[in-house]
Amino acid sequence: MELTTTKFRVKDLTYIAVFTALLAVCAWIAIPTPVQIDFTLQTMGVFLAVGVLGGKRGTLSILAYLLLGLVGAPVFAGFSGGAGALLTPSGGYLVGFLFSGLLMWGMEKTLGKKNWILSLSMVLGLIVCYAFGTAWFMVVYPMGGESVGLWTALSWCVIPYLPFDAMKIALALLVSVRLRPHVK
């Protein structure tokens, strides 16, 4: 039985580090909203990481971003960091980023690297992120001592963001298709 090992070249680690930094910058660009979850470019950073670098390196950059934030580096939205960031109403979206990357990686591995597959994986990845984030929001955000209902959570955390997220997917897809051939 032969064991296979994965070797990362310096170039791979550099790409992962650059997209980890890009995710942080995307988190810092925020537009405040009346509810507790601001418009940020984080999901676009997630889609760019996986779209440009591929599933493995892109997902590793998302993981590195989350680990940096968990140890206290101020890489999350609002220049926040630390494990406490996961306990905020938007903490589920951070976890959702990793599962979005894993889904996109799985689709790439099983279906290939065609543009329509990348586009579909971005849409499904967004749905996964929304699912984690909305479920977590319903648990964490108390309303009169009770959890928020599903419709309220969707109307606060998903519906207002759909047009903005559709634009982020379109832009991430365009940039990914252009840059992917140059990042080997």
Image (spheres, grey):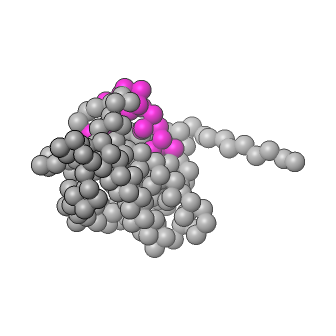
Residue found at the very far front of the displayed protein: 145
**Front residue of 99 and 155:** 155
Question: The magenta stretch spans which residues?
Answer: 60-77
Q: Is residue 32 magenta?
A: no
Count all numbered tags in the image, as a single digit. 0
Give the image location of residue 44, x and y in percent: 33, 54
Residue at x 60% of width, y 40% of height: 9
Displayed quadrant of residue 124? bottom left
* Percent position of residue 22, x then y: 35, 43
Q: Is residue 52 visible?
A: no
> What is the x, y in percent for residue 11?
54, 41
Q: Main secondary structure of the magenta part?
A: helix
Is residue 49 something that shows in the picture? yes
Q: Quadrant of residue 78?
A: top left
Q: Is residue 89 left or right of residue 101?
A: left
With respect to residue 104, does 11 lie above or below? above
| Residue at 14% from the left image edge and 46% from the top image edge | 32
For image coordinates 30% across by 49% down, the residue present is 138
- Residue 29 percent location from the top left of the image: 22, 44
Q: Quadrant of residue 69?
A: top left
User: Quick check: is 69 in the magenta stretch?
Assistant: yes
Residue 120 versus residue 139 in the image, above or below: below
Q: Residue furthest right?
A: 1
- Residue at the extreme bottom: 116
Judged from this view, the residue extending furthest toward the top is 72
From the viewer's side, name the closer residue of 90 and 27. Answer: 90
Location of the C terminus by quadrant is bottom right
- Which residue occupies 35% across, 57% down? 130
